[in-house]
Amino acid sequence: MKFKKTCIVCGKSFLAANPLYCLCSNDCRAKRKTVYKKRYEKTHAEARREQRRKRNEKYREQHKNKYHCKTCGTVLPNGCQKYCLDCLLRAYQSEELRPWAKDVLHSRGYDETMIDSEIAERESR
């Protein structure tokens, strides 16, 4: 059974196979879709921006470069560092690596008394 209907977009009369149909062609469907899409984008713009911001933030966090100590592999907080403090203090205690470790620790702001107190504190644990 066919139903005589009028298209709500262009106003043409057409025969519909279903009484719920209200659009005559795919062109009218596309026009109506763009109108609804623009209306939706206008009313939900802020929510979509917030959703995009959260997604980008999550992506950045997942793909952020994580720097690891070259000796033990622990994650380092700063990208400029190559060795963790534990490995540097162990190197400072060995005779052959002491000059190198001393230079690196000095560049990080440690002096001999701070280094010695840090080693003593870690040994007491």
Image: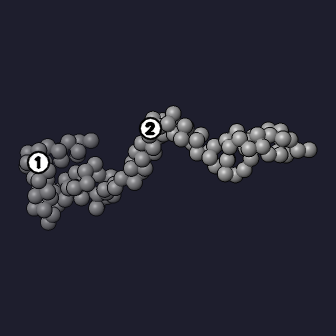
Q: Residues within 10 Å of mark 2 (few under 14, many from 20)?
A: few
Query: Which residue lies most toward the right here?
Result: 1
Residue type at mark 1: give it. Answer: Gly
Residue lying at 72% horizontally and 50% vertically, measured from the top left: 25
Left or right, 82 with respect to 1, comes to left
Whole-percent x and y of residue 51?
47, 40
State the image coordinates of residue 105 (x, y, percent, origin top left). 13, 53
Horizontally, is 96 left or right of 26 in the view? left
Residue 69 in picture, x, y percent from top left: 29, 57
Q: Let me know if residue 86 appears in the view.
A: no
Q: CA distance from mark 2 to mark 1?
A: 42 Å
Q: Which mark is residue 50?
A: 2
Q: Residue 114 vs residue 123: left or right?
A: left
Which quadrant of the rendered structure holds the N terminus?
top right
Residue 108 image offset from top left, x and y in percent: 14, 50
Q: Which residue is mark 1?
A: 109
